[in-house]
Image (spheres, helix red, strand yellow):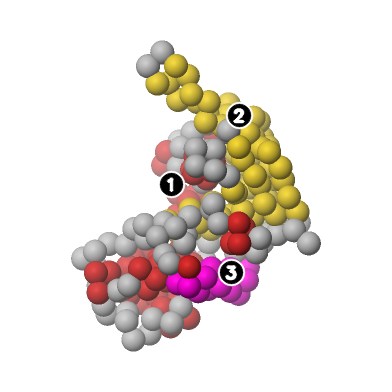
Amino acid sequence: MAKILRVENLSKTYQNGNKKLVILDNINFDIEEGETFAIVGPSGSGKTTLLGLSAGLDRSDEGTVELCGENLSLLDEDGRAALRNSHVGFVFQNFQLIPTLTALENVAVPLELRGDSSAETEATALLEKVGLKYRMHHYPTQLSGGEQQRVALARAFCNKPRILFADEPTGNLDEATGQNVIDLLLTLNKDLGTTLVIVTHDMDLAQKTQRILKLRGGKVQELQIQE
């Protein structure tokens, strides 16, 4: 199996006045194409920072990240953005939908930006798949939190990403709604063969993945393989 993400000797620090804060310290792991992978740890352990570095949203101080066969440190900001647009999807805790666009328009936007003439057809099909066929012309403020996250899932999968990064995807949802979103996320992932990387504090969610990376204090505490 090809490695879609390879992280080697990754470190990240921030300067806070005279103090240097070590956020990540010598992180190493790799993920195979099609794998489901969770990154867990307490608040402040570096989970979201690691996701951002892995996806090329930020640069590390030391170490290398290879994403979809590209060494991110050799790409400028435009190059990293082009790689993300072609191969990467994102789901965030706060949905990040555009409030002035309908559900259908929110999902279609990434495809339209790529000049895809079938954007509306593809977006409609995905909204049907996430159970929002009859809500696609509603605006985000007219949708519940769970419905907004389902729109965000449809948008994340619309360009058929090779890898999807989900940052606390159930963090703003109640338990029942969150469980529905988890099931939907894993079903879409399986159907489309996408590699899935989830940052979460929810161990029930993490246990549904194939491997779990446990962070504490910016260091890898354990890399757990699921049965």
Which numbered disc, 2 or 1, marks the residue closer to the eye? 2
The image quadrant of residue 45 is: top right
Looking at the picture, how far across and down is residue 227, in whole percent? 78, 62
Report the residue at 52% width, 31% height from top.
23
User: What amino acid is found at the position of numbered circle 1 in the picture?
Assistant: Ala
Find numbered disc 3 in the image and state the secondary structure of the residue it sits on: helix
Residue 205 position (above or below residue 50): below
Looking at the picture, how far across and down is residue 103, in whole percent? 31, 73
Towards the viewer: 54 or 118: 54
Q: Which mark is residue 186?
A: 3
Q: CA distance from mark 1 to mark 3?
A: 26 Å
Which of the two discs, 2 and 3, labels the residue nearer the N terminus?
A: 2
Q: Magenta segment, which residues?
A: 176-193
Q: Which mark is residue 25?
A: 2
Residue underneath mark 1: 81
Which numbered disc, 1 or 3, marks the residue closer to the eye? 3
Within 10 Å of the Cα at label 3, are there few (<14), some (14-19), or many (20+) other Cα atoms? Answer: some
Q: CA distance from mark 2 to mark 3?
A: 30 Å
Report the residue at 45% width, 72% height from top.
177
Find numbered disc 2 in the image and state the secondary structure of the residue it sits on: strand
Return the residue found at the far left. 100
